[in-house]
Image: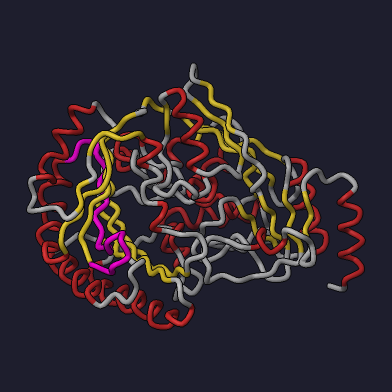
Amino acid sequence: MSESPLTDAVTELANTFRGRILRPTDQGYEEARRVHNGLVDKRPALIAQCHGVADIADAVNLARTLELEVAVRAGGHNVAGRATVDGGLMIDLALLKGVHVDPKTRTARAQGGVTWGEFDRETQLHGLATTGGMVSSTGIAGLTLGGGMGYLMGKYGLAVDNLVSVDIVTADGRVRTASRDEHGDLFWAVRGAGANFGVVASLEYRLHPVGPTVTGGLVAYPFTAAREVLRFCRDVLAPSAPDELVAFPALVHAPDGSGTKLVAIALCHCGPLSDGEAATRPLKRLGSPAIDELGPMTYCHLNSMLDADYPRGALNYWRSNFLAQLSDGAIDTMIECFAACPSPLSELALEHIHGAPTRVAVGDTAFPHRAAGYNFLVLSQWMDPADTDRCTAWARDTYGAMQPFMAAGRYVNYLDHDEPGDPVARAYGPSFGRLQKLKAAYDPGNLFHMNQNIRPSP
């Protein structure tokens, strides 16, 4: 597009726009264009920092009229950098930070730029929470609209299972409220595939009594104990875990920067503290922990405990897949691959799914993965660009080695930018065909395609 029509359109938009419209030469542009993953370095032609829903609608209409590629940034944590775009329009929700908690109805409505740390701070004033991310700087919108696994999911389900409604600006510039009673088909779709259907301006969640103190934290053991610990998680901890207990075992590096390899378990028990102490007692008796930070802590602290392990601007490359089962072969392969890990910021994580998410029918939401088991994540992370080739190669090699143990499904929030085959179809499985039809109804021109894209059916 020539510069003149773009300039004219921006000038006209500025007459009513309440937020900020940034061009590449404007102060604040460089900071605004950055996303969490330092491996992503894109330069939008425009960044529309919206101050309200009307700003979002104007930005969507501008993108459609000028045929600009459009990306939507909420928290900006998506590993593939889908929150930004080269030469197009970034719709930035970072200024939208409102959170309203209603303790009587146990609900909260939060705007699209809110992070989990900000959300938890407001809800915990009332001793309430909902399932959210494990890193407090993650945006609520991106994590929720793709599924949303977290510490409370065993008891209360995934983040999408706790959505009551969303306000969404669709490709035609209209503002719609989607819930079970209003635009129910759209509400079904956004619970797992929301980025494909518009810009979610606000999300209403169901809240639950949690905290302010829970039993949680991290326990880690020497890497030599990795086989024993992972088998314990599979054979003892997982089968006996009550809904209140969610545990995520992982192969990690020591937090002191030494590069020492460890096997660790991050966990939360959201029930009574006495029950939490009893549920975590076996872990304290399992060998000799190198780190033992399990015990009573505030829920807000638990959800920010790992923040320093995922610094903004670090270079990230991920691979992920659900496992058919955590077999001895899978455990041994994980250990062998992690022994060759080249970066002290990288890890191999297992997200154990049980309890409430498995009691939701496959077709109830667009997120279809409702079987008990594990999601496996290769999280390759490093700081020096010179290490990019070997760190990405390690991630690909590890993922390849684990393929014999993988199930058919994939978690859409973890898909990176260069996935082979058709990972989106695998991520949505039985929901994919219905999603294609709804995409054709709500976004027939595929305006929102800088995402884990579902192309509209013909």
* 354 and 79: which is toward the camera: 79
Residue 56 position, x and y percent, is: 73, 47
The total of numbered circles placed on residues is: 0
Q: Is residue 135 magenta?
A: no
Residue 44 position, x and y percent, is: 71, 66
Residue 147 position, x and y percent, is: 44, 48
In this picture, residue 165 sits left or right of residue 28: left
Q: State which quarter of the image contains the C terminus.
A: bottom right
Farthest-out residue, top: 104
Residue 273 position, x and y percent, is: 23, 28
Magenta extent? 241-260
* 453 and 84: which is toward the camera: 84
Q: State which quarter of the image contains the N terminus.
A: bottom right
Rendering quarter of residue 221: bottom left
* 391 and 400: which is toward the camera: 391
Residue sitting at x 42%, y 34%: 130
Q: Is residue 18 above or below residue 350?
A: above
